[in-house]
Image (spheres, rainbow, N blue to C red):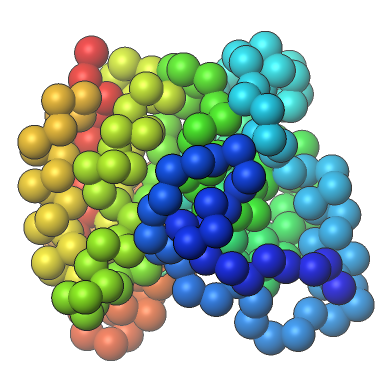
Amino acid sequence: MTKVDDAPCGETGGAAHFPERWPRSFGRRKGRTLSLRQSALLVEGLQNRSIDVSQPLDALALKRLFPDSVQDIWLEIGFGGGEHLVWQVANNPRVGVIGAEPYLNGVVSAMDALVTRELTERVRVYADDVLALLRGLPPECLSRAFMLFPDPWPKKRHRERRLFSAHLLDKLAPLLRPGAEFRFASDIDDYAEAAIEAARSHPAFDIARVFTTDNRDTMPDWPVTRYEEKARKQGRGATFLVLHRAI
Ligand SMILES: C[S@@+](CC[C@H](N)C(=O)[O-])C[C@H]1O[C@@H](n2cnc3c(N)ncnc32)[C@H](O)[C@@H]1O
């Protein structure tokens, strides 16, 4: 089994080159014990399809991580089991996707689906805290980003762990091309409200659309994620937010 560092990034410094402290926004890194096949998938996936930002990447080095056919690079933050990521890769043949997800069982599920569908070529995985990844990417390299149903941290004393924040927007903004889209969704009302407020007051972002589950079918290229489905089953609708990087 791959050895996993369970220490909170914010409390240890996370990636060694990342000096800032930030509260850890994710829960566990490991779930059910992986089978031999899953462990092999994980090790192989991390060896061949991961993205190394221990040294900051320049634009050319990033481009070289993907096939020549890739014209745009998208980022999915917290892809969970990877259902949305896999759908986007399958449906956008000119796009390369970087997925950040510290939950290793989720990374395995995504790798499994990507291998089965022969889609690994256009994917790079960062199996850790996205904030460390953001620090290593070159300016204006992303033409779309997603953060769908981030961990809700409902208790007041945990609010600072919420990943969508002015801090995250500060780090993401310089990496997005002008006009690039950033999609966010949450089934937690006060999280969605706080996200709208953070976006509204951030100079680098414009709010292009806000809609709820009632208007969900207006976005056919935004598939339902596992957590959205779970929330639906529990009777919770969601709020969806489309931001644009200000031009
Ligand atoms: C509630 S799940 C949602 C998963 C998926 N987006 C969906 O909608 O089904 C939130 C995910 O975000 C991941 N996450 C939390 N903090 C993160 C961080 N700092 N960087 C990357 N992923 C993070 C968690 O590990 C978890 O898998």
In the image, taking residue 129 as reference, residue 52 lies left or right, namely right
Residue appearing at x 32%, y 85% in the figure: 233
In x, y percent, where is residue 195?
A: 18, 51
In x, y percent, where is residue 22?
A: 39, 53
The quadrant in which residue 73 appears is top right
Vertical arrangement, residue 167 with respect to residue 62, above or below: below
Query: Is residue 5 visible to the viewer in this orientation of the structure?
Result: yes
In the image, taking residue 15 as reference, residue 151 lies left or right, namely left
**Image quadrant containing the N terminus:** bottom right
Is 114 or 23 nearer to us in this picture? 23
Vertical arrangement, residue 4 with respect to residue 169, above or below: below
Residue appearing at x 79%, y 51% in the figure: 46
In the image, taking residue 140 as reference, residue 182 lies left or right, namely left
**Image quadrant containing the C terminus:** top left
The quadrant in which residue 23 appears is bottom left
In x, y percent, where is residue 179?
A: 29, 19
Query: Is residue 79 visible to the viewer in this orientation of the structure?
Result: no
In the image, taking residue 167 as reference, residue 24 lies left or right, namely right
Is 35 or 12 nearer to us in this picture? 12
Residue appearing at x 80%, y 68% in the figure: 3
Residue appearing at x 37%, y 68% in the figure: 151
